[in-house]
């Protein structure tokens, strides 16, 4: 295509929730490697995707992982601090129910798609996807 002289810049806006918080460092690294800046927003609804519903022992391990692995060029401190907050545990139960239901109708398996995250969850919540 012909260059029409209009400056264009691209950036990534990553919505962060229960399903992707664990793998955030890897996601960021992929975009960083191709030169795209990444910004974050926090999923609030549905509540079962809100990172604040994750049980405390799991959140502590995720915080450690993010603090260690997430490069400083990504401003994710607010996400790490949000993991200090809690919301009603019923939303974690809903997350488990929805994940199991979606796996069934999509023919997927959370444990196979996210094996490391699954093991972390199972360590602290043995009933996960049982």
Image (tube, rainbow, N blue to C red):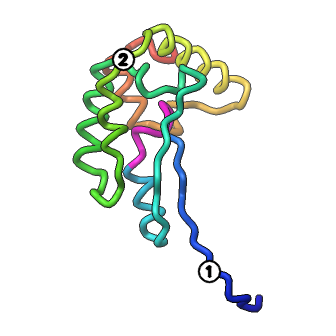
Label 1 – label 2 distance at C-alpha:
43 Å
Q: Give how far across and how far down residue 10 sits, in percent.
A: 57, 68
Q: Give how far across and how far down residue 21 sits, in percent.
A: 43, 38
Residue shown at the point (22%, 48%) measured from the top left: 68
Task: Determine which residue is flagged by label 1.
Answer: 7
**The N terminus: image quadrant:** bottom right
Question: In what element is the residue under mark 2?
Answer: loop
Task: Determine which residue is flagged by label 2.
Answer: 86
Q: Nearer the viewer, residue 76 or 17?
A: 76
Q: Give how far across and how far down residue 51 sits, in percent.
A: 43, 28
Residue shown at the point (37%, 51%) measured from the top left: 25
In reply to whether residue 95 is colored magenta, the answer given is: no
Q: Residues within 10 Å of mark 2 (few under 14, many from 20)?
A: some
Residue 3 higher or lower than 33, as above or below: below
Q: Nearer the viewer, residue 126 or 4?
A: 4
Residue 10 higher or lower than 13, as above or below: below
Residue shown at the point (26%, 31%) measured from the top left: 61
Residue 33 higher or lower than 55, as above or below: below
Mainly helix, strand or loop, the magenta region?
loop
Q: Earlier in the sequence, mark 1 or mark 2?
A: 1
Q: Are marks 1 and 2 in contact (CB under 8 Å)?
A: no
Q: Nearer the viewer, residue 102 or 84?
A: 84
In reply to whether residue 19 is colored magenta, the answer given is: yes
Q: Residues within 10 Å of mark 1 (few under 14, many from 20)?
A: few
In the image, is 15 to the left or to the right of 121? right
Residue shown at the point (59%, 25%) measured from the top left: 45
Question: In what element is the residue under mark 1?
Answer: loop
In the image, which is nearer the foreground, mark 1 or mark 2?
1
* Residue span colored magenta: 17-24
Task: Residue lying at the far front in this picture: please name it.
Answer: 6
């Amino acid at each position: 295509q012909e260059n029409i002289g209009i400056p264009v810049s691209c950036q990534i806006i990553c919505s962060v929730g229960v399903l992707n918080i664990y793998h955030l460092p890897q996601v960021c690294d992929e975009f960083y490697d191709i030169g795209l800046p990444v910004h974050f927003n926090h999923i609030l609804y549905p509540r079962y995707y809100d990172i604040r519903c994750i049980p405390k022992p799991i959140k502590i391990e995720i915080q450690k992982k993010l603090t260690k692995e997430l490069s400083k060029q990504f401003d994710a401190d607010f996400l790490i601090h949000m993991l200090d907050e809690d919301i009603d545990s019923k939303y974690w139960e809903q997350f488990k129910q929805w994940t199991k239901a979606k796996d069934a109708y999509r023919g997927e398996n959370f444990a196979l798609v996210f094996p490391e995250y699954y093991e972390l969850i199972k360590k602290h919540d043995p009933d996960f996807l049982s």
